[in-house]
Amino acid sequence: MADRTFVAGDARRAAAVAEIAAVGKRPSAIVRLSRSDRELLARWSRKRTLAARVVLRSRILLMLGAGRSVAAVAAALEVAPATVRLWRHRFLEHGPQGLLKEASGRGRKPALNPATREAVRAGADDGFPSVRTRARELGVSASTVSRWRRRRE
C-alpha cells in the first residue's frame, strides 16, 4: 500500500513536470511581438545613431520575443535579470514607445529648491549692488547667483 501511494505521487509529480516542460515558461514571462513591433525593434537594434540604451532595450525584447528566457537574455547581453524584467514589463505596459522614455526621478536633482531658484531668477533684474551680497541674502554661492544672472542676459 505504501508503494502504491509513492508511485501515485511520482505519477502526479511526473505529470506536473511534463506540463511545465510543455509550456516552457510562465505565461507572465511570454512576450508576443506583432510583426510591426518586431520590425520596429529590429530596426532600432541595428541603428547606430540611436541611443545605446534604446538599442539594448530593443535587443532585450527581440530575444524575449524569440522565446528565450529572462536568464538567457540577461546572460547573452550581460545585464542583470532585473533589467530584462523591467523592460519586458515596460514594453507590455506601453509598447515600443515605452522603451524610449526614462522613468521620472532619474537624472541629476536640482541643487536649489524651487523657492530659492525663483528668488535668484527674480533678483537677476533687481540691480543688487553685488553678486556676493545677493548670494548672502539667499544663502547660496556667489557663482550660483552669477550663473543665473548670465542666463537672464
Image: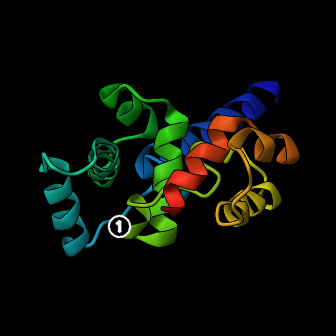
In the rendered image, residue 12, in percent from the top left (x then y), is placed at 64, 43
Q: Which image quadrant: the N terminus?
A: top right
Of residues 135 and 17, the one nearer the viewer is 135
Residue 128 shown left or right of residue 35 in the figure: right
Tell me which amino acid carries mark 1: Pro
Residue pictured at 65% horizontal, 60% vertical = 124
Above or below, 16 relative to 97: above
Residue sitting nearer the eye, 34 or 53 = 53
**Res. 116 in view:** yes
Vertical comparison of 99 with 4: above or below? below
Residue 15 location, quadrant = top right
Residue 60 relative to residue 11: left or right: left
Residue at the image point whose x is 35% and y is 48% from the top = 57
Q: Nearer the viewer, residue 59 or 22?
A: 59
Q: Is the residue marked by circle 1 packed among few (<14), some (14-19), or many (20+) residues within 10 Å?
A: some
Whether residue 26 is visible here, answered yes or no, is no
The residue sitting at the front extreme is 129
